[in-house]
Amino acid sequence: MSGSTFQTNPYRLCKLLEDCHTGTIQLPDFQRSWVWDEGRIKSVIASVSRAFPIGALMTLKKGGEVNFKPRVVEGVPDLAKQNIPDFLLLDGQQRMTSLYQVTLRGQVVETVTPKNKKVKRWFYIDIRKSMDPSIDREESIITVPENRILREDFGRKELLDLSSPQKEYASLMYPVSQVFYWDDWQDGFQEYWSGDDNKGIRDEFKAFKHNVLDNFKLYQVPVIALDSSTSKEAVCVVFEKVNTGGKPLDAFELVTAMYAASGHELRKDWYGDECVKGRHKRFLETLRPPGLDTGIIAKVSNTDFLQAISLFYTRELRREAEASGKKGKELVAVTGTRQALLNLPLEAYKRYEKTVEQGFMKAAKFLHMLHIYRVFDLPYQSQIIPLASILADIGDAWEHDANRAKLVKWYWNGVFGELYGSAVDTRIARDFMEVPIWLKGGPEPSTVSETMFRADRLKTMRVRLSAAYKGINALLMKEGAKDFRSGQKFDHIVFFGENVDVHHIFPQDWCKKNNIKPAVYDSIINKTPLSYRTNRIIGGSAPSEYLDKLLQGSETIPPIDPERLNTYLRSHLIDPILLRNNNFEEFMADRQKQLLVLIEQATGKVDYSIDLSEEGEDIDADEFIVEAELAISEE
């Protein structure tokens, strides 16, 4: 039977804060700590004081499928911690904690300045300013230090003293900590300003009470109340829809709260503590090169890690279903979707976590083997998930040459097929299932069989946003490209020691002087990995000029033998004669052909949309520019 799993009702603010005070309303353990600065607290006080909306809250009724570990709102009495909550506050923590701290708690508020300096503050409403329509209400909300004395000039000059109720009365400063229960303060105020001469001040307070304080007492907040039948997926989706102002809730935080209810600290697993190095830190440091803060798998997220575990767990469920004779739609899908993560039992997490971690460590080694050393140069972050999962699954079998060759082929097909750019959940699961079977002699995985690479795509790859652009750079280094100046291959020591990066072969300045458009000369066809020092020698000169510099040498650089330099150039798939003749058009056409052969070798196929040659004839070099411009205009 279908039906709504939520209600939207207005609740008195005072009642909501009292429920926080007693522990009837608590927070799920995934919520981050209270962090609002005094400026934002002033803003929410001002809004309530004018009966302006501060946004809806969202609560979840306890007792259903979603079993989050609760924790109390910061600052509530210790007694509240012993209570089992009726509701969890999913959205509105910052607002409710701020209002609770400044109103009901009755203690100085520990907050931060806009510059993130920790301070202790009492909050007041300037009665006269709050009643002046020409003054912005936020300007009437003031803060004073813990001793309630406001000073300036490095503490030498006293501006305001509110250190006793009498001084509050005298200054017409109303403490926000009394906005719900004002009888005692009002009695003291009336007594302080008694007498006929002070009737005007008493009338001011009466108007303030009616126009400002009554707004606090009568204020109602819309609350989206999810009942206990709400599913985990619905909690996550609904939260993201309503939580437009804060950090979106992700699956890791939900799973963290669910595991916490069983006594497991998932956050500690990932982030560690003072005594234990968390998994996140271990990933940051895996194969970290000298001089850099992070290694190649530094950006593997906590949800990436859970997704890999989910692949193993859902495959386990599928195999069990197959063993019991189930078929077709009865079988569990192998997946790492958010819904799958929310359904990931703690036992499954514990069963696979170490295996999967080792898979990510092996993935880092695999990527280094392909000469991909930095996150910046990684073609697809998302492809690490199936790579790590496959390596975790096959164990030491990845060290066998035949298996490793297939894995390399699969990886490059994913890169040059540009298959891991978006909506990749299905592909990740498919590769996890298909690649291990392929390694054992089964059919090619769909990532290999489906890959197509258009020849003219090379002309449009101009920036590092393209996975294939990064792939070609890595392939050149892997296939033995040598630096023009030093003749060194780009292993990880040379790569970082010589500050290697992608640079133009025909320099930008030369191309501009020869009226070649950026859309053409910025193509990956005209780029290659080179060291920083070599690129300085190249500068903006014509190729013939910088090649002469390399041949002749200098005081700091020995001359290079012409044939040796030719060997260096050929290792980058560059025709030395075309480069020395400054023949840009023929160079681009020739190198396009050679790069396509390189991609063919990496992917193990030829399926290009244009012929590279007819009866042995080269591509028409004069048509190269036109083709490049047409390809760009089509994009």
Image (cartoon, helix red, strand yellow):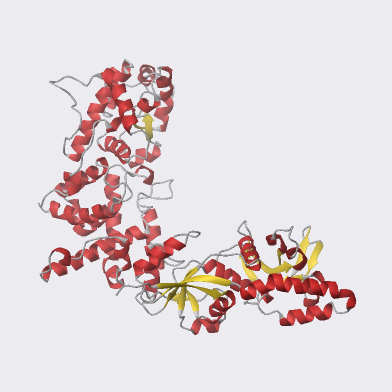
Q: In terms of depth relative to the viewer, which is nearer, 395 or 524?
A: 524
Q: In terms of depth relative to the viewer, which is nearer, 131 or 627?
A: 131
Residue reaching furthest top? 581
Residue 147 is at least partly visible in this image: no
Residue 73 lies, in percent from the top left, at 53, 74
Residue 506 is at least partly visible in this image: yes
Residue 373 lies, in percent from the top left, at 34, 44
Q: Which image quadrant is residue 219 in?
A: bottom right
Identify which residue is drawn at 60% across, 71% down: 99
Residue 508 lies, in percent from the top left, at 41, 24
Would you say 11 lies left or right of 596 here? right
Q: Which image quadrant is residue 6 in?
A: bottom left
Would you say 322 lies left or right of 184 here? left
Would you say 263 lies left or right of 566 here? right
Q: In terms of depth relative to the viewer, which is nearer, 64 or 482?
A: 64
Q: Quadrant of the N terminus?
A: bottom left
Identify which residue is drawn at 75% across, 71% down: 207
Total numbered circles: 0
Q: In terms of depth relative to the viewer, which is nearer, 599 or 396?
A: 599
Q: Is residue 602 above or below residue 51?
A: above
